[in-house]
Image (cartoon, rainbow, N blue to C red):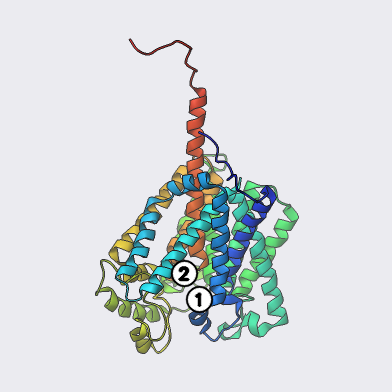
Amino acid sequence: MQLPLKSPTSVLSPLAEAWLLRLIVILFVVFALLPYGISWDYTGTSSLTMEGSLAVKLEWGSLFAVSGFLLYQYPALAIRNLKALNPFLILILLWCLGSFIWSPMPGVTFKRAIQLYGFVAIGLALQISDHPVRLIVSSMLYTLMVMLAASFVMGIVNPTIGIDYELGGAWRGILSQKNELGQVAAMSILLWQVLACISKVNARIMAVSLIFAFLMLVLSKSSTSMIVTITTSSIFHLLRKPRIDSEYAVTRVLLSLLCLILVGLFVFFMQESRLPTSAEVTAPIAGLFGKASDLTGRTDIWELVWLEIRRHWVMGLGYGAFWLGPDSLSQYVIDALHWIPLQSHNGYLDILNEQGLVGLTLTVLVILYHAYSLLLMRRTDQTQAAFWTAMLLVIVVTNFTESSLFRGFGFLNVFFFIAMCTVTSHNRAQRDKAIQDFRNLRPARKPGFSTKR
C-alpha cells in the first residue's frame, strides 16, 4: 500500500501547509467562541441578525475554502479518511440535506445542511498534519489563553463590556456571556494537561497558565464550567492509563469513584440548573455554588415545542427550519413566552423537532459509533482516547440543556466534527499500518515455487 502522495499540482511548501493548518484551528476557535461577526452587541438581537450576516458567511466560508484547498493537495489521503468516517455521520448528513425537500424553509435548510459538510472538510483537512492531535491541542490552547488574557484586560479596562453586573458581577471578558468565558477557562485547564502528556512543555509556564486560567474560571462564576473542569480532568487522568491494577491502583479507584460522583452532579446540574440540596445529597455539595433552579422556564418551552413535534415526529420539520426568530414557525412560542428563544434548551428535543425520529435515531447511532471508535483508539493511543472521551461526555450531557449537536457554528458542534474525523482517521491509519506490517513479515515466495498440486 503506497503512502498518500501530494498532488503533483501542489503549490504549497510543507511550512506553508503547517501554518495553514494551524490557522484553521485558530480561526475556528475565534469564530466559534467570539460573538457573531466579532460584534459585542449585548442587546439580545445580535444572534438573530448576525448568524446569517455577510461577515459570518465570509468567516466560515473562508475556512471551508482553505480546508477544501488543502484536501485537494492530498486527494488519496482525503479519500481514505472519508471512507473511514463514521458511517452514521454520513447518513445523518444526507438526511439533513435531503430534508429540504419537505422543509417549509427549503433554502434555509439547504444552506444550514451544507455548513455541516464544511465542518467535515475542516476535520478532514486537519488530518493532513503528521500529528493532528498535537496540532489541534496546541493551537487551541494558545488561542484560548490569548482569549483569557484579552478577557482579563477587557474586564479591567472596559468593565461595561467585560463584566455582567446583572449577574452579580460575573466576568464575561470578550465573550458573549459568563458561561462561555468559563468554558474557555475549563478547556484551557484540560488542554494544558493533555499537552503535557503528549509533548514537552515548560513546567513554570504551565503552572502560571493553569493558575491564571483557574482565576478566570472563578471570576466567570460559571458553576457549569467549574464542574466540567473537575469532571474532564478526572476522566482524562483515569482513562489515560492502561489498567486500573497498575502501580497507583488505590488512586485510580478513588478517581473512578470521583468521576462517577462528578458525572452524576454534572447531569443533575445540567437538568436542574443547580446542585443537589442537602436533602438530596449533602449540605456542603449543595451549597458549593448556590444557584437557584430555573427549570420551569425550560419546561414551558419544551411543552410548546412538543406541539410542533406531534405534527411530524417521524421525518421532522426540516433541518434548521424552526428556530428562526420573529415571524418564523417558532412565532407561537415567542407569543406565549413574551421573549425570543432561539432553541428549546434541549438539543435532543430540537433534533426530534427538525429531523424527526429518524434524525434522533441517527444522532444516537453517531454517538455510539464514536464511543466504539474511542475504544478502538485506546489500543494504540490511550492518552488521545482519554482526551476525546472526556470531551464526548461533556458534549453529550451539555446537549440536554443547550442545543449544540448538529446545530450551527457553535464551538462544541464544530469540535465534535473535528473529534470524529480525528478518531476515525487515526484508527484507519493504524489499521493500514498493521496490514502493511503483516505483509512485510510474510516470507517471500521462492522463484519457481507453486502451490498447485
Residue holding disc 1: 51
State the residue at coordinates (59%, 58%).
190
Under circle 2, the secondary element is loop
Residue 314 rendering spot, x and y as whole percentages: 25, 66
Occupied quadrant, residue 303: bottom left
State the residue at coordinates (41%, 79%).
324
Query: Foreground: 391 or 36?
Result: 36
Crowd around label 1: few <14 · some 14–19 · many ≥20 (10 Å): some
Under circle 1, the secondary element is loop
Can you name the residue that lies furthest to the front here? 9
Q: In the rendered view, does 368 fall on the left or right side of 69?
A: left
State the residue at coordinates (54%, 67%).
61
Q: In the rendered view, does 287 fall on the left or right side of 105?
A: right
- Say which amino acid is labelled 2: Gly
In this rendering, does residue 244 appear at all?
no
Question: How far is disc 2 from disc 1 in space, using C-alphas?
Answer: 9 Å
